[in-house]
Image: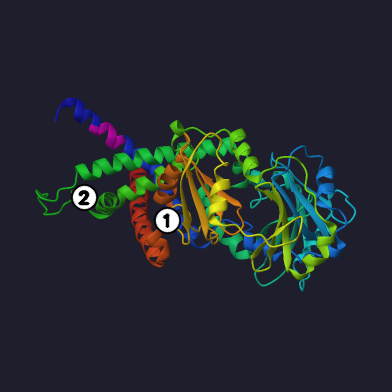
Amino acid sequence: MSPALRSLQRWLVSSHRWLAIATCLLFVAWFASGLVMIYVPFPALTGAERLAHLERIDWQAVKVLPQQALELAGVQEFPRELRLEMMAGEPVWRIRERRGWEYSFSAVDGELVSGLRAEDALRVVNAAAPGVQPRFIETLERDQWTVASTFDQHRPLHRIALDDDAGTELYVSSRTGEIVLDTTWRERFWNWPGAVLHWFYFEELRGRRELWRQVILWTSGVGIYVAVTGLWLGIDRLRLRKRYPTGKVTPYRGWMAWHHLAGVAGGVFLLTWVFSGWLSVSPPVPWAGEPDARLIQQGLDAYAGNSDARFALNPALLPSLERLDAREARFEWLAGRPRIVITDAQSGRTVLDADTGAPVTYSQEQLIENARLLVPGANLHEATLLTSEDAYWYSRRGPRRLPVLRVKFDDEHATWIHIDAATGAVLGRMHAGDRVNRWLFDALHSFDFAWLRAHRPAWDIVMWVLSIAGLVISVSGVVIGWRRLRAR
C-alpha cells in the first residue's frame, strides 16, 4: 500500500471513530423511535376523523346562498374551496382562498365567524361530540402538537378535553370555529419516544423552521459520512476466503466484532435510511425544477370551466337536499357546470347539478376529454383507470380513493394527475421530481413497496429485522465509543 493510501486509511479510521462516538447515539434514537412510529404516527386530523366531528347539515336553516357568501368574502376569483358545514348547530360557509387563507361566514345571517372565545369552542365541541362533557383546558398559540405552520391561520387555538377513556383532546380554531386537530393520550405519550425524537420535533426547535432544517441536514449529513466510511472500512477488513489466523472473518472480538459484522450486514440499509432522511428536508432532484404555479392554476380553471367568483344556486333545491345525510357540501365547477358534491357520514359522495338538483355522473371518456385542459400547452398521451392501489397511488394514513383515473402529459415536468372517477375531482398531481422522491425517500425510508404493504406483517418483520440490525450497529458503537473515552 502506498504511503498516500496508508495515510488516507488512517484518516478515515480516525474520523469514523470520533464522529461515530457522537452519531451512534443519534442512530440508536432514530432506529428505536422509528419502530415506535410504525404503530403510532404523529397526531393529525384524518379525513375520517374530521367527518366524524361534523353534524348533519340543516338545509332549512340556510338563508345565505353561495353567491352571497362569495361576495361577503370579497374574493375576486373562485376560491380553492367553497363548502357548507355545521358549526355548533348552525350552518356555516367555509371559504378557502387560492392563497390558502380560510374564512367562515354564518349561512343564517352572513356574520363573519371570528374571534371565538372559550365558551364558543365548548359549544362547537358539544355539537361535534354529543354525549360527552367537554372541559376547557387552555387557549394557546402553539404547543408540541400544533407547531406546524399549517395551523398559523387558525391561531390562537382552544384546547378542549373530552375526558373519555381515550383521553381525547380537540383543538378548535378561534378564527373559523373548525376542529383542526385531535389527539389521544396514547398518541401524546408514544410520540415523545416516537416522532418527536425521530424528527427532532421539539416545539422550540421545530418552531424555527430554517434552524430545524439545518439541524436535520447537518446531523444526517454527518451520519451519511459515518455510514459510508464504516461500510468501506468494514468490507475492507472482512476476510471471507483468506481468514485471519484465528479462523474468523473479522479481526475483532467482543463488541468490536459485533459492530464490524453487523455493520457489514446492515450497513447498506443504515446508509439508505440516513440518506433518505437527509432527503426529507432537501430537494431530491434539484435539476427537475418546479412547475409554474400560475400554469397549474390556469389548468385547474380550464378544467373547472370557470374562474370567476360566481355560483348561482336555485334556493328551491335546498329542501330536497334534506333527504341526504349530508355532513359536508362542496360547491364547485366542472366543465363549465356548477355542481354540489355532498359527502355523507359514511364518506359516500353524491354529485348534483346546482341548477336542477339532478344526479350527475361522468363517463371515462368525458373525464379524459376534459382532463386535456389540465396542463396548458401539453398533450395527454396516456389515461389509465386504477381500480386498485399501485406503486404511486397507495394508502399512507388512510385509504386512497378508488377507482381513479390517472392521466399523463408530455410537458417538461412529465406531469401525472389522479382524478376521482366518480366525481371528477382532481385528487393529486405528480411531477418527475415527485416520482423520484417516492423512491429515494418513501421507498428507502419506509420500505413501502406494494407487496410488503399488502402482506402485513411481512412488512413489519422486515422493518423490525433491519431496525434491530441498525440497533446492534449503533449500540455497539456507543459501547465502543464510551470505553474509548473512558480510557482516554
Q: Mark 1 points at which residue?
A: 448
Q: What element carries label 2?
A: loop
Q: Give the range drawn in magenta.
A: 9-14
User: Is residue 444 in the magenta section?
Assistant: no
Q: How crowded is mark 1: few (under 14 residues within 10 Å), some or many (20 or more)?
A: some
Judging depth in this view, the residue of 5 and 254 nearest the camera is: 5
Q: Nearer the viewer, residue 49 or 213?
A: 49
Tell me if label 2 and label 1 are in contact, CB under 8 Å.
no
Q: Is residue 461 above or below residue 266?
A: below
Q: Of circles 2 and 1, which is in front?
A: 1
Q: Which residue is drawn at 40% across and 59% down?
A: 450
Q: Which amino acid does label 1 sit on?
A: Asp
Quadrant that contains the N terminus? top left
> Please, what is the dominant secondary structure of the magenta stretch?
helix
Does residue 249 appear to the left or right of 35 in the view shown?
A: left
66 sits to left or right of 251 = right
Find residue 270 and report its horizontal and vertical position in percent. 35, 49
Say which residue label 2 marks.
252
Reply yes or no: does residue 11 show up in magenta: yes
In the image, is residue 46 above or below residue 268?
below
Q: Can residue 88 be seen in this view?
A: no
- Residue type at mark 2 is Tyr
Could you tell me residue 40's position as x and y percent? 53, 61
